[in-house]
Amino acid sequence: MVSLTTNTLRTIAGAALFAAFGLGLTGCNEKKEETAEVVRPVKVVEIAQADTTRKLDYSGVVRARTDMNLGFRVNGKIVERKVDIGQRVKPGDVIARMDATDYILAVRRSQADLDAAEKQVQTTELARTRAQTLFNKNVTSKSQLEQAELSYEQAVSTRDSAVSALSEAKNQVAYADLTSDMNGIVTAINADVGQVVSSGTPVITVAVDGEKEVQVAVPEMDIAQFKVGKDVKARFWSDAALVLNGKVREVSGSADQSRTFAVRVSVPNDPRVLLGMTATIEALADNTQPYVSIPLSALAQKDGKQIVWLVDRSAGTVHSRAIKVADFADDGVRVADGLKAGDVVVAAGTQFMTENMKVKLAASSAQQASAETNAASADIVR
């Protein structure tokens, strides 16, 4: 068994105390390192002076200025359709036929009525001539002559009525053929073979050749910016280089079920513009107040309010500021209140920001903020 002297024990205790003290200092240093303040680099965008105009973009479809909804002028069952969608038609072309059996029978009946009326006219004419001869010989009275004349006139009227009825019946037969009135292209088939339709029911829609236009739907917040005669530009998705000058031709006086107003824009007749193509109408509108835009990534929320994080360049810290958002667009957020020219806004990583957090603007970020002053921040959201 090993026995330790008093001096040895004191030496061991001192070494243990020194080691514990050293470990404590090491822990303090590590803790200090852990609590060292973090300076986070941020990407920013600088707000430029807001413009007083903004660009309105609305997508629409190229249409013919005049669409004919052709329908039969009589009731019946469709037995033949002679055109398809996309087929061209010209005046007089038969595009559909209806079963005309009943109308042909009506023609025969009217013809028989007319023949009978003709025979009645001949009979009453002979009676009138005979009555006139007897009256001249003082054989019959004046009243008998007048009665014969009235019978003749009545027969003539009946014959004239039969003539009109026959003409009407023949027209009904002709109306069983649906024909085009103008040059155009078939854009819709609304009724087909076997369907029973009433007179006036749209069967074929034909887009009339001539001027084309673009129809767009404009919400009520912007409809006041569209007046008849306003100059606009039309761009087409199928050809980015195709840009035409147009004029607002018609503005709907009431909103439809989607709470938008139909606006029709006339465009020049260009062979590259085809019916059904998608177009974008661009117009400039005066703002009731200036707006600025920020990237969507710069928008954040705090306590249920929409905010942005502003950078204080002198202190190198960020602070939140509540803003009023006007609307959203594909390329950013349009801000109505809360920002002014010269404000530096954190453009990305807003979820990591806290009040008075230390940040630094990298050289590239500072250059970007200056470059985007006129390119991004002052753009008006379409």
Image (cartoon, rainbow, N blue to C red):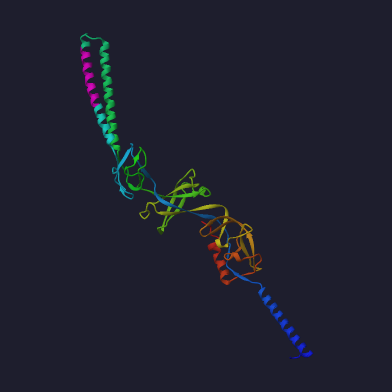
- The quadrant the N terminus occupies is bottom right
- Residue reaching furthest right? 6
Q: Does residue 119 appear in this view?
A: yes
Q: Is residue 86 magenta?
A: no
Q: Is residue 124 magenta?
A: yes
Image coordinates for residue 340, horizontal then vertical, percent = 61, 59
Identify the residue at image location x=39%, y=54%.
277
- The stretch in magenta equals 114-133
Residue nearest the viewer, comparing 363 with 9: 9
Identify the residue at image location x=54%, y=65%.
372
| Horizontal relation, residue 25 to residue 323: left or right | right
Residue 303: which quarter of the image? Answer: bottom right
Residue nearest the viewer, comparing 267 with 336: 336
Helix, strand or loop: magenta stretch:
helix
Residue nearest the viewer, comparing 74 with 57: 74
| Horizontal relation, residue 94 to residue 310: left or right | left
| Horizontal relation, residue 375 to residue 102: left or right | right
Identify the residue at image location x=26%, y=22%.
156
Image coordinates for residue 127, horizontal then vertical, percent = 22, 16
Identify the residue at image location x=22%, y=19%.
123
